[in-house]
Amino acid sequence: MNSMVDSPLQAQMSEAQSVPMTFHPKSHQAGEAHAQNERWSLERIQHLFDMPFNDLMHQAQEVHRAHFNANEVQLSTLLSIKTGGCPEDCGYCPQSVHHETGVEATKLMGVEEVRAAALEAKQHGASRFCMGAAWRELHDRDVEKVAELIKVVKDLEMEACCTLGMLTEPQAHALKDAGLDYYNHNLDTTPELYGDIITTRVYEDRLNTLGSVRRAGMNVCSGGIVGMGESRAQRGGLIHQLANLSPYPESVPINHLVHVEGTPLSHLEDLDPLEFVRTIAVARITMPTTRVRLSAGRQALGDGIQALCFLAGANSIFYGDKLLTTGNPNWALDQALFSKLGIQTT
Ligand code: SAM
Ligand code: DTB
Ligand code: SF4
């Protein structure tokens, strides 16, 4: 048997220390395994996915407790600062101009609207405020405006996160200088499936943006979506990409596909929820110190599956009754769940 599975904690800790701390986007070609310096092979990840459920949960809990308080969850609130009208054709997304979803395009939000939303989030207990824009990439003409919005959040003494599409390196530096703590840019799925879901950009574009974010000194938030018709091996392929980033992301959102009418993926069958829990557990084991965020799709999961996700090592959520364009459990529902589970929030 793989010694990793016999003695998970020692193996992971010694391994984490041997990981080179520089990020080389050129060595991360789409579709290729990270042949050298690979922390986690596809085979080892697959082995984790295939473990008996209780063993997998036990291992995930061990790793989780070695690095975090297992009864604490971090709260991030999300605000769409520029909705709809996106030129990209991401098959899951209600904000693409390619899909008829009824989402109306808006202009970039102003400072006062953002301040009010961030203040409300803070009053409800959120410690991080994330701003999302339906852009393919950030345009230079918008950098100053976004920098102002970041400053508004920082003035309220919250962590600031943005997700604005692709970034150049100078743009990443400008956002860092404005005080941005995290940049969210998801790999979304395994390289081999990418072209079936999105045709307007390639995997390596995403990796290049993550490289710019790293080099600018910001924390990387990168994860993906499960339930897009992928196989278990392909879910493993996504985790393989994320876990072998060097260093791996500080924050890993795992989204459960929200089926939005009008998107090409709306007709897909729901993923078995226990597969979703397994994905969380494998993310926790392979990226021991990251914040694993239980992200989109919580409304469809219910309390029981969410509780299993926290047991599997999820320790962050999007908090507030709206994600970008779709719904999310409201503040009171989440507070009731945390109270039932004895979870403290940060
Ligand atoms: N336009 C930027 C981008 O794509 O990076 C930022 C906003 S985009 C909406 C952020 C993330 O939302 C996507 O990478 C994807 O993971 C997630 N997302 C979008 N639609 C979703 C859906 N229907 N279900 C689950 N996650 C979704
Ligand atoms: C992430 O991984 N999930 C969030 C956040 N990063 C920006 C977005 C979820 C969007 C779900 C679909 C919607 O509300 O439009
Ligand atoms: Fe645009 Fe982002 Fe939606 Fe893709 S996921 S269509 S890039 S807003």
Image: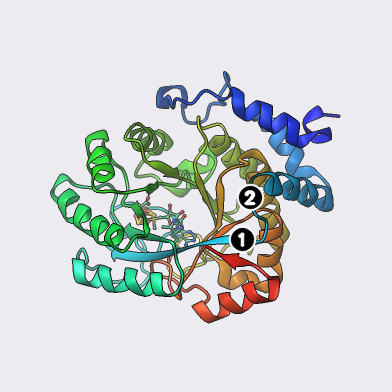
- Tell me if 295 is positioned left or right of 144 in this view: right
Task: State which quadrant residue 323 falls in.
Answer: bottom left
Q: Position of residue 204 (x, y in %)?
A: 40, 33
Task: State which quadrant residue 271 falls in.
Answer: bottom right
Residue marked by disc 2: 68
Which of the four quarters of the rendered structure image does ligand 1 lie in?
Answer: bottom left
Scheme by which the image is coloured: rainbow
Task: Judge by depth and name the residue closer to the eye, 332 or 32.
Answer: 332
Q: Secondary structure at mark 1?
A: strand
For image coordinates 22% across by 66% down, the residue present is 109
**From this viewpoint, which residue is outermost toward the top?**
36
Q: Residues within 10 Å of mark 2 (few under 14, many from 20)?
A: some
Q: Quadrant of the N terminus?
A: top right
Q: Position of residue 299 (x, y in %)?
A: 57, 73
Q: Position of residue 320 (x, y in %)?
A: 45, 73
Do tag 2 and tag 1 residues touch (Cβ < 8 Å)? yes
Task: Judge by depth and name the residue closer to the eye, 238 or 331.
Answer: 331
User: What type is the residue that disc 1 sits on?
Assistant: Glu
**Residue 199 visible from this viewpoint:** yes
Residue marked by disc 1: 72
Q: Secondary structure at mark 2?
A: loop
Q: Position of residue 249 (x, y in %)?
A: 49, 40
Q: CA distance from mark 2 to mark 1?
A: 8 Å
Q: Residues within 10 Å of mark 1 (few under 14, many from 20)?
A: some
User: What type is the residue that disc 2 sits on?
Assistant: Phe
**Residue 110 visible from this viewpoint:** no
Does residue 91 lie above or below 269 as drawn? Answer: above
For image coordinates 34% across by 44% down, the residue present is 200
- Tell me if 102 is positioned left or right of 92 in this view: left
- Tell me if 3 is positioned left or right of 145 in this view: right
**From this viewpoint, which residue is outermost toward the right?**
1
